[in-house]
Image: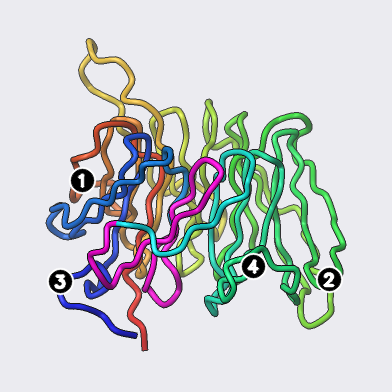
């Protein structure tokens, strides 16, 4: 892999934010300085994810995914994926980098073969959850196309689902503000993964928008329209820290929603994206804001944070 000095890909920490102002911004995480801005002309950006080899970043928007090169300063996407009818709201990668998955408002989950830039019908040996607005979580066995359904709260939209790195838990949050957690069992070889209800957390009083486990699997973060991101201990799912952007000024109206979050590799810090045009770096233990990332002209609704070191 060729990495040009001074590019985003040469930085050991990749932090990118995007949202409704049609830009993707890259930041020095420690200083808060914006080092690169990419114009994403087609639409707002709903989701961001860095490829496992840290060579590209995927930006999902309305009807498309655009892939931008992190190892050059090329302002244009180097790969385009089109053909989706509505907003793409989530994007991610298989750990070996050959496959990309997306989900969106057309009620479809898709697997894309990155080697030929097409939707793939040859993705095997994994279990893949996706969700819909009627409150159903679909668990797909991609070897057999077998589909199981979970309905934690009927007719309440599921907004986010995440599996922890240890594959011990799956969490989902919905528009009632509730967070549901399942234990994962089985799933080795041809064995079907079993989901065993673990707990229900009344996490927020308004929409829950995102849930993310920490890299060490000891923490779970939930973001909400109530202007908070809450961090829960997975040992007993008690509340550890509440991160709030609520104003102490009685005359100031709401600063908006907390849309997205991502933990640092050591699980000690977390970055959040919010409707007040800012991203913030917080200390997980104390809840202290360590840095603010200012530059977007509209709401920041998604981010990608990667501080892993490739071997």
- For marks 4 and 2, the one nearer the N-term is 4
Q: Which residue is mark 4?
A: 168
Q: Nearer the viewer, mark 4 or mark 2?
A: 2
Residue 2, percent across and down? 29, 84
Is mark 3 in CB contact (under 8 Å) with mark 4?
no
Q: Horizontal and vertical percent for residue 146?
A: 87, 62
Residue 51 drawn in magenta? yes
Looking at the rendered structure, which numbered label has been put on residue 228? none
Q: Is residue 46 above or below residue 177?
A: below
Q: Nearer the viewer, residue 71 or 277?
A: 71
Crowding near the residue tagged with mark 2, few <14, some 14–19, many ≥20 C-alpha atoms within 10 Å: some
Sequence-first disc among 3 and 4: 3
Range shown magenta: 49-75
Quadrant (top left/top right/bottom left/bottom right) for the N terminus: bottom left
Q: Is 133 one of the magenta-colored residues?
A: no
Label 4: few (<14), some (14–19) or many (≥20) C-alpha neighbours in 10 Å? few
N-terminal-most mark, 3 or 1:
3
Residue at the disc numbered 3: 6
Instruction: Give the spatial CA distance, label 4 vs label 1.
Output: 33 Å
**What separation in Å lies between label 3 and label 4 (alpha carbons)?**
39 Å
Circle 1 residue? 293
Q: Residue at x 55, y 44 (%)?
A: 89
Q: Residue at x 81, y 73 (%)?
A: 143
Q: Are marks 3 and 2 in contact (CB under 8 Å)?
A: no
Secondary structure at numbered mark 2: loop
- The mark found on residue 192 in the picture is 2
Precedes in sequence: disc 4 or disc 1: 4
């Amino acid at each position: 892999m060729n990495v040009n000095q001074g590019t985003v890909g040469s930085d050991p920490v990749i932090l990118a934010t995007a949202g409704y102002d049609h830009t993707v911004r890259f930041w020095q995480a420690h200083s808060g300085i914006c080092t690169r801005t990419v114009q994403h002309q087609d639409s707002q950006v709903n989701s961001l994810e860095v490829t496992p080899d840290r060579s590209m970043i995927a930006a999902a928007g309305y009807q498309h995914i655009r892939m931008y090169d992190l190892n050059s300063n090329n302002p244009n996407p180097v790969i385009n994926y089109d053909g989706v009818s509505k907003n793409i709201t989530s994007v991610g990668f298989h750990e070996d980098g050959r496959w990309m998955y997306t989900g969106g408002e057309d009620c479809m989950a898709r697997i894309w073969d990155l080697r030929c830039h097409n939707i793939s019908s040859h993705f095997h040996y994994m279990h893949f959850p996706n969700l819909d607005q009627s409150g159903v979580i679909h668990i797909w066995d991609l070897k057999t196309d077998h589909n199981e359904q979970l309905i934690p709260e009927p007719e309440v939209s599921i907004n986010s689902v995440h599996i922890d790195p240890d594959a011990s838990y799956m969490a989902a949050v919905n528009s009632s503000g509730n967070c549901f957690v399942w234990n994962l069992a089985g799933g080795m070889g041809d064995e079907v993964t079993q989901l065993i209800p673990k707990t229900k957390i009344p996490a927020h009083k308004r929409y829950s928008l995102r849930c993310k486990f920490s890299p060490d699997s000891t923490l779970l973060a939930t973001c909400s329209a109530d202007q908070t991101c809450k961090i829960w201990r997975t040992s007993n799912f008690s509340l550890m820290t509440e991160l709030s952007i609520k104003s102490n000024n009685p005359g100031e109206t709401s600063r908006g929603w907390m849309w997205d979050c991502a933990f640092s590799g050591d699980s000690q810090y977390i970055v959040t994206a919010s409707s007040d045009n800012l991203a913030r770096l917080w200390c997980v233990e104390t809840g202290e804001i360590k840095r603010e990332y200012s530059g977007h002209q509209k709401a920041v609704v998604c981010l990608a944070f990667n501080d892993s070191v490739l071997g």
